[in-house]
Amino acid sequence: MPRKLAVGQSGGATAVINSSLVGVVREAMQAGVFSEIWGMRRGVEGALADDFVDLSSLSQEKLEAIAYTPGAALASSRHKAPDEDIERLLDILRRRDIVSFLYIGGNDSADTVHRLAAHAGHRGQSLQAISIPKTIDNDLRGTDHCPGYGSIARYVAIATMDSAKDTESMPTMYPIKIIEVMGRDAGWVVAASALGKRSPLDAPHLLYPPERRLSLDQLLRDVDCVYRRYGYVVAVTAETLRDTEGRPFADPELRSELDKFGHPLIRGTADMMCRIIQSELGPRSRFDKPGSLQRMSMLCVSDTDLEEAEMVGRAAVRMALGGETDRMVTLIRESDDSYRCSTGSSELSDVANQQRLLPSNAILDDGSDVSDEFRRYAMPLLGRRPLPVYARLG
Amino acid sequence: MPRKLAVGQSGGATAVINSSLVGVVREAMQAGVFSEIWGMRRGVEGALADDFVDLSSLSQEKLEAIAYTPGAALASSRHKAPDEDIERLLDILRRRDIVSFLYIGGNDSADTVHRLAAHAGHRGQSLQAISIPKTIDNDLRGTDHCPGYGSIARYVAIATMDSAKDTESMPTMYPIKIIEVMGRDAGWVVAASALGKRSPLDAPHLLYPPERRLSLDQLLRDVDCVYRRYGYVVAVTAETLRDTEGRPFADPELRSELDKFGHPLIRGTADMMCRIIQSELGPRSRFDKPGSLQRMSMLCVSDTDLEEAEMVGRAAVRMALGGETDRMVTLIRESDDSYRCSTGSSELSDVANQQRLLPSNAILDDGSDVSDEFRRYAMPLLGRRPLPVYARLG
């Protein structure tokens, strides 16, 4: 009996989220049992408006081009679907005879899929609701890592090396550099900034993951100590860093801005740090904030990440064909020596609205580097193209 | 008779400024007439402190590694040397028997070299003072283009494509994106952001070079018009944009900060635009500000730029050997069809403290694209690796 499938993209775009979409479409085409393959425009937001696009007639050339295009080709959303929306979505899927619902996203999206599966179960509506992991935050539980992380890790490692060379070039003019990176509540992206560090003199000198609260005094002591030792300082901070009182390390004016899920939208952590350091310690301070570019660079992409993103998309189709539902595809590390991952799956109730934070020992106590264990974990995720090696005159 | 040479790096670091340094050292080594090759630490700032480093014993491996390292390996400075410093520098050069003074930098550095040559002439001190062009602003007169520009142009073109894919992915959440780029008073970098644009729908939709004054009303009209047509807007602005009254388009608090040359240091143009657009028009607005990363990316480097940077360094050594002084090396475009440049030279009095701004017709009147003439000028400078081609589902 011919089946019908729908796939959507949700949450922040990444360099490899289209690779997962293409994985779904390719596997569904090859399975030969899907009479229709639909893409939801803007995730459930579009699906609720019955805005679907036919993906079953895409050429292989187009699919190949989409796989190498950063961002969400279907467009994405952060729509937080209340239960009425979940019910309405089930009505729309039933009317369209769609029995396989695949959704590419992070924690919030996993929650949507989980509730969709539960409501379908209560109704007795046949539905395979599968979540395909995607988040640069790398904070999904149950999977070795998340597609999107390897590429932002590679971007941030290289950007830190590049930005540090700027600071080294002008130590008397601008000795303090703060680089502000993403990662929401988890420090995986902050930690990745140290993957190109080969000696204590190399940047970053200070790492501030969001799991660690930081007092103003501690910041000033840290910066002063490194500045006295090397003559310049490169620190990497999470944009979501908080002080010891739990307050965002950012302009008070911006603290009140909240997005729909209640995650505080903070701009200005690095800016704030620069102002404090310059006024309290004196040396001129600058910051770099690569913003959405850190998520979107196809030039910095990890080839391993790109391949695994397609792999989890394909695995989701096979799970749906096997009748599974209410599960998320996971990545399982098979070997550390010659890195290799296979796919598995987790119950969505173990994933949805949970977070896997950076282990507290991944960053050394003084914040000057990452642990060897973190390096062994993260380096293979950067892919097979090595990081650049930069030189000094000596 | 053995000669002695000194080379320094000045002004903002770039991805290719070390390639010029390596060009100088390689050509000087090959010439076989230099008994000593000195590098000045931190430009004239270090030279005035007699801080020189021996470059004549660097291995070919080290030189190769330095050429592929972004930033100024000798360290750089923005020291504005008053006449007393120029005199003192001449004393130091004479004491060290240095007769060839090569200085890699932009307009301000050219002025330093020009005054050094003039003072040496008045004294009757033998000196070949040669300026080696380097500026991502591309605003030096007398040369087809400036080493450093091709690489930042490639970075900004790709970053605009990447950032726009983020905006396209979330048109209902964050429909307005402002990308803030460098270029000081010249719009060459702003214009380069359009080099990956292939259709009117592609970003950037609005270009704001610093040569054009922009009123708040015009900004709001422009953004509203594009937003109504496409549902999202990607605009690229110079960080130095000014309003019709000539005031920096940035936070008033930041307007007072001036650097030593009197160029206003403006942070916040894009931030300011976002706040105005969001409060006056409504749609949520975000900005990307790649900061120093746009100057420093070896991953985005133009191979042509890297080669030409070495070429101008080598040419400066030959000019010094030929007894020339008070001149800057220039690039001369020999052919447009199959792009090729050779080197020439200009009098420093025609270069120092002058600016070559972007021609007013390089950006279309409505700011929506660049002219075909600008494309023909700029595309070869991006090098032989093509820009990525991104796809839409259609």
Image: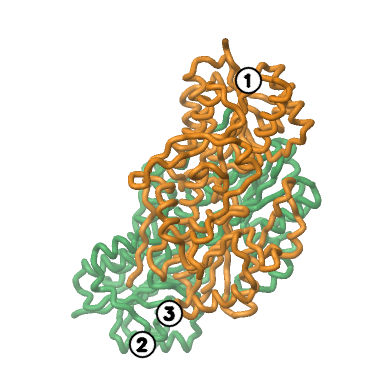
Chain colours: A orange, B green
* Residue found at the far top of this picture: A1
Q: Are marks 2 and 3 on the same chain?
A: yes
Q: Which residue type does callout 3 highlight? A: Val
Q: Residue at x 67, y 58 (%)?
A: A267
Quadrant for the C terminus of chain B in the image = top right
Q: Residue at x 36, y 52 (%)?
A: B341
**Dot 3 crowding, Cα within 10 Å, few <14, some 14–19, many 20+:** many
**Dot 2 crowding, Cα within 10 Å, few <14, some 14–19, many 20+:** some
Q: Is residue B40 above or below residue B282?
A: below
Residue bearing mark 1:
A99
Q: Nearer the viewer, residue A161 or B211?
A: A161
Q: Secondary structure at mark 3?
A: helix
Q: Nearer the viewer, residue A239 or B223?
A: A239
Q: Secondary structure at mark 2?
A: helix
Q: Which residue type does callout 2 highlight? A: Ile
Q: State how many labels appear.
A: 3
Q: Is residue A256 above or below residue A206?
A: above
The answer to whether residue B373 of the structure is visible from this angle is: no
What is the chain letter for disc 3? B
Report x, y in % for residue B16: 40, 60
Q: Is residue B147 above or below residue A280?
A: above
Q: Secondary structure at mark 1?
A: loop
Measure the alpha-carbon separation of dots 2 and 3.
Answer: 11 Å
What is the chain letter for disc 1? A
Residue bearing mark 3:
B44
Residue bearing mark 2:
B92
Q: Nearer the viewer, residue B337 or B82?
A: B82
